[in-house]
Image (spheres, grey):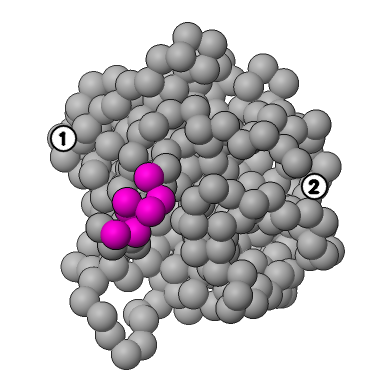
Amino acid sequence: MELIENVVKSQNKLGEGPLWNVAEQALYWLDIHQNQVERYQPELGLHQTTTLDLAITVLGLREQEGFVFASNRGFGFWDGSSRSYDLVGNPEGGKPYHRFNDGSVDPVGRFWAGTMYEGPEVDEVPEGRLYRLDSDQRIKLMETGLTISNGIDWSPDHRTMYLTDTLRRVIYAYEYDSTSGEIANRRVLIQAKETDGYPDGLTVDSQGFVWSAFWGGWKLCRFDPQGRLESTLRMPVEYPTCMAFGGKDLNDLYITSAWTALSEEGRHAQPEEGDLFRIRLDISGLPAYRFKSDRTTEQGKRV
């Protein structure tokens, strides 16, 4: 059984969005509910936290320095060190209880991010949507009718896009055209059972297998490209949220977690919930793609 290490006792309320920066040999991730960006350099054992005045929900690397992001205030850019950022646009700005959730940069350098409802309890959850931010900062609606739009990634051959629809416990596969950035012919790749928990963050390894973290399920699952379960890694926490490959050889799997769903009694019983974990594997990941921006169009509002 793989050794699961607790590498940072970050105690994130809602840890999410791990992202490995190969150039820095550093992992970035987020505490969405506490407006924090976390950074960890494993070789130095250095952990740093930056607190902003908005909730960044997903980061993507840019070709130049810094990050593209999605947040509770829409898309934007952040330099990675200051507390200032540039807002680009918010296609759901008129929906007070909607925010962006997970996302990723695609193989060509476009940034995709989906939305979710986070408000008072309702009988029917309002739809989540999937958007794409292009290099010219145009925002395009790509998918509708989701519940919580969650983990997203692409196959190594760049022909398939995977997207998680959390409350339906589904991971979809789409035909993906890397030239146009269009998706088509959605199909259910994985339908989880109620006893599994909810599929949350997602990543694809170098062999083309799909990894999913199961919120409420105490586990990570690895599926082959046809959607068959290949292996299960049991976690010491109930709410793993997302994972990313890192390290020099990209075979260290980092996993974020959250305590936001726990009662005080539950937090006492699960003191590691919200920490950052690592599993060293004989399977490697792929380096994160970088957002390609047209500098002539960078006119976001500085905040």
As helix, strand or loop, the secondary structure at mark 2 comes to loop
Q: Which amino acid lies under the numbered mark 2 shown in the image of this protein?
A: Gly
Residue type for callout 1: Val
Q: Nearer the viewer, residue 92 or 265?
A: 265
Q: Residue at x 61, y 36 (%)?
A: 4
Residue drawn at (49%, 28%) of the image: 7
Chief secondary structure of the magenta portion: helix
The residue at which mark 1 appears reads as: 303
Q: Where does residue 250 sit, x and y in percent of width and height?
A: 69, 26
The reply to whether residue 247 is in sight is: yes
> Can you tell which quarter of the image residue 90 is in?
bottom left
Using the rendered image of the protein, determine whether residue 70 is visible from the camera's viewpoint. no
In this view, the mark in front (1 or 2): 2
State the residue at coordinates (54%, 41%). Answer: 255
Q: Is residue 270 magenta?
A: yes
Label 1, label 2: how many angstroms apart (C-alpha)? 39 Å
